[in-house]
Amino acid sequence: MELRFSEAEETLRGEVRQFLLDNIPEPTSSDGPGGARENDEDFENAVEFNRKLGDRGWIAPAWPKEYGGLGASIYEQIVFNEEFGYHGAPDTGTRGFGVGMIGPTLIIHGSDEQKAEYLPKITSGEHIWCQGYSEPGSGSDLASLQTRAVRDGDDYIINGQKIWTSGGHRANQMFCLVRTDPDAPKHRGISFLLIDDIKNTPGLSVRPLINMAGRHHFNEVFFEDVRVPAKNRIGEENRGWYVGMTLLDFERSGIGTTAGQRKTLEGMTEELQNGSAEDRERYRLGLSDLVVSNNVAKYLGYRIGHIQATGNVPNYEASVIKIFQSELGQKIYNYGIKMFGLSGQLIPEEPTAPWRGDMPEQYLLAVPSTIYSGTNEIQRNIIATRGLGLPRS
């Protein structure tokens, strides 16, 4: 595995960095998780920013040119992801869910017609995606999902509920796991559907779920006789579980998140350098340990990029980075709260809050990171079975 970027890749990094510095809109409110802008003005600014990326072919540069990419290498894509994460480039669901998840899944499992229909609308920024996976009784045990889809001629009719749908109130598209055969074993009988124009789909309603940081990022989605064309199914009927697991492996690569954590650590270092000698002595070694761990996370992410660059799909390696990165994030923000002292607990609305109050908010948002996208306990079981060849517990 090559651990250094070429001169051309570093030149690209400089170009991307300058573009981001010149074009990232200044937020009018605190960012929510994953850079999802909270109010309408910030969201519209983020949409416009992503359209600028689309005009340059920078939303998914590693995709083929016919789908709106640049035909860039995986390593060049890593450069983009790192710079986006480090500089906090706002996402709308186009990059995270579109490029990072449903796009690669379509490239692997989609028909030619589906690729032609959906991929260009991701790279242009037109489609804003959300994920319909978790249900009130099916989170970690996702395969127990109960949302039903019954075939009716050329359509499926969907009834049920999804929960913890990130950005569902902003999205116009959804990819969704549904049960099409209730009598099959739970990992079978599941199909993978794409739902178009969800804001105007009869029978589909979205309700907010406010997180403990006081932000509207999550939603619950209800389906009442929602019709979806059968041509929107990816892969075979009742084989959607395997399509969905491919998508989650892409979701867990995490290079941009690691870069964002690095910027946080750099900010904490600057605060310590400008602080008292007593604080420098108290926190320097702990901060050093976090920087070491952040570098480990970076190279774990590079490893996943290398796997993809050689034409393979990351498997248990994605679980490794998901565990390491999510637990590291909790350590970073917990340590940041300690470093800032009592003022570090001030929320974004307080004018004297250090870092615009980002530290306590990110601390709160880091708490569920070991739960969503598959709990870390499940990830450890994946490593044990797929990576180490051990029997299931």
Image: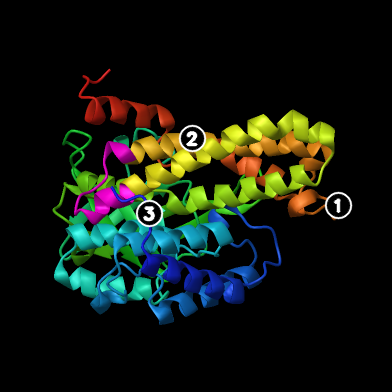
Helix, strand or loop under label 1? loop
Q: Amino acid at mark 1?
A: Thr
Rendered position, 10 above or below 23: above
Q: Amino acid at mark 2?
A: Thr
Quote the CA–CA distance across marks 1 and 2. 31 Å
Residue 208 makes an appearance in the image: no
Q: Is residue 169 left or right of residue 63?
A: right
Identity of the residue drawn at 56% across and 47% down = 261
Of pointers 1 and 3, the one earlier in the residue sequence: 3
| In the foreground, 83 or 65 | 83
**Hey, which quadrant is residue 390 in on the image?**
top left
In the image, farthest residue toward the bottom: 55
Of pointers 1 and 2, the one earlier in the residue sequence: 1
Helix, strand or loop under label 2? helix
Identity of the residue drawn at 43% across and 58% down = 96
Quote the CA–CA distance across marks 1 and 3. 41 Å
Q: Nearer the viewer, mark 1 or mark 3?
A: 3
Quote the CA–CA distance across marks 2 and 3. 30 Å
**Screen quadrant of the C terminus:** top left
- Residue beneath disc 3: 4
Identity of the residue drawn at 70% across and 62% down = 29
**Was residue 94 drawn as part of the magenta stretch in this picture?**
no
Mark seen at residue 352: 1
Rendered position, 141 above or below 109: above
Mark seen at residue 269: none
Q: Residues within 10 Å of mark 3 (few under 14, many from 20)?
A: few
Q: Nearer the viewer, mark 1 or mark 2?
A: 1
- Residue beneath disc 2: 370
Of pointers 2 and 3, the one earlier in the residue sequence: 3
Q: Nearer the viewer, mark 2 or mark 3?
A: 3
In the image, residue 198 lies at what x, y percent? 41, 66
Per the rendered image, the range of residues in magenta is: 304-317
